[in-house]
Image (cartoon, helix red, strand yellow):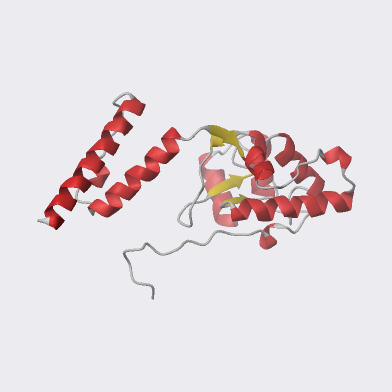
């Protein structure tokens, strides 16, 4: 009987979470992908979803400052200080499960300036990412012609370049070059913990 009561309580909690999700979305939410899911997994997913939906807005800039990282303006730092500050920011972001990609076309000063003045000031939900989650700053994902040219020039392999030739025959494909800086291979990269319901091999 105790297990039955527990199952009923869990089912009620799940229904309450779904109702809250529907209220927040104005009824525009579907739960079809959760059908047949283990109740523990379903409840955990719904709790995580509601935590995100109900969280206030912030920026990664504010989260860094809250974590004790000072964020001086780039022009107040000399080159050595910029490099030290950039790596402090990179490593603290990685601890927060926030990672960067495709940065080798930028100097340390250019990257820190972009982070300080733009990227880190974009609004985001004030949630703590766990070991199964990550946020990625893909610096050339904006879709502009300039970003596409830089990606094709410095990062795309031949297979990707060939896809571009077929899909965008009028787009000028630059000759591949080695990027001017060598940072990406040193950047932190996310690892993910195995799901808790699977054995660790």
Give how far across and how far down residue 23 sits, in percent.
31, 26
Q: Residue at x 20, y 41 (%)?
A: 12
**Residue drawn at (87%, 38%), measured in percent from left and top?**
75
Residue lying at the far top in this picture: please name it: 26
Q: Position of residue 123 (x, y in %)?
A: 58, 32
Q: Is residue 99 above or below residue 60?
A: below
Tell me if 47 is positioned left or right of 157 in this view. Answer: left
Q: Is residue 173 visible?
A: no
Q: Residue 154: horizontal and vertical position, in percent? A: 69, 51
Residue 53, position as x, y percentages in the image: 42, 34
Query: Compared to 149, does 27 lie above or below?
Result: above
Count of labels shown? 0
As drawn, the residue found furthest toward the front would be 2
Seen in the image, is 127 located left or right of residue 21? right
Q: Quadrant of residue 113?
A: top right
Image side of residue 158 versus residue 198, left or right: right
Up/down of 197 relative to 156, above or below: below
9 or 97, nearer to the observer = 9
Report the residue at 81% width, 45% height from top: 109
- Indicate the quadrant where residue 165 lies: top right
Front in this rendered view, residue 84 or 182: 84
Residue 132 or 119: which is nearer the viewer?
A: 132
């Amino acid at each position: 009987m105790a297990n039955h009561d527990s199952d009923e309580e869990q089912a009620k909690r799940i229904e309450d979470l779904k109702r809250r999700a529907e209220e927040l979305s104005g009824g525009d939410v579907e739960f079809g992908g959760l059908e047949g899911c283990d109740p523990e997994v379903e409840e955990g997913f719904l709790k995580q979803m509601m935590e995100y939906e109900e969280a206030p807005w912030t920026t990664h800039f504010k989260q860094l400052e809250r974590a004790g990282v000072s964020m001086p303006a780039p022009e107040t730092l000399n080159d050595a200080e910029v490099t030290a500050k950039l790596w402090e920011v990179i490593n603290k972001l990685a601890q927060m499960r926030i990672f960067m990609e495709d940065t080798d076309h930028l100097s340390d000063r250019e990257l820190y300036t972009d982070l300080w003045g733009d990227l880190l000031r974009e609004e985001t939900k004030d949630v703590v990412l766990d070991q199964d989650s990550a946020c990625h700053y893909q610096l050339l994902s904006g879709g502009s012609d300039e970003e596409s040219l830089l990606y094709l020039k410095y990062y795309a392999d031949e297979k990707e370049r060939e896809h571009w030739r077929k899909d965008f025959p009028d787009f000028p494909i630059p000759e591949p070059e080695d990027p001017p800086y060598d940072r990406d291979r040193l950047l932190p990269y996310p690892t993910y913990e195995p799901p808790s319901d699977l054995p660790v091999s």
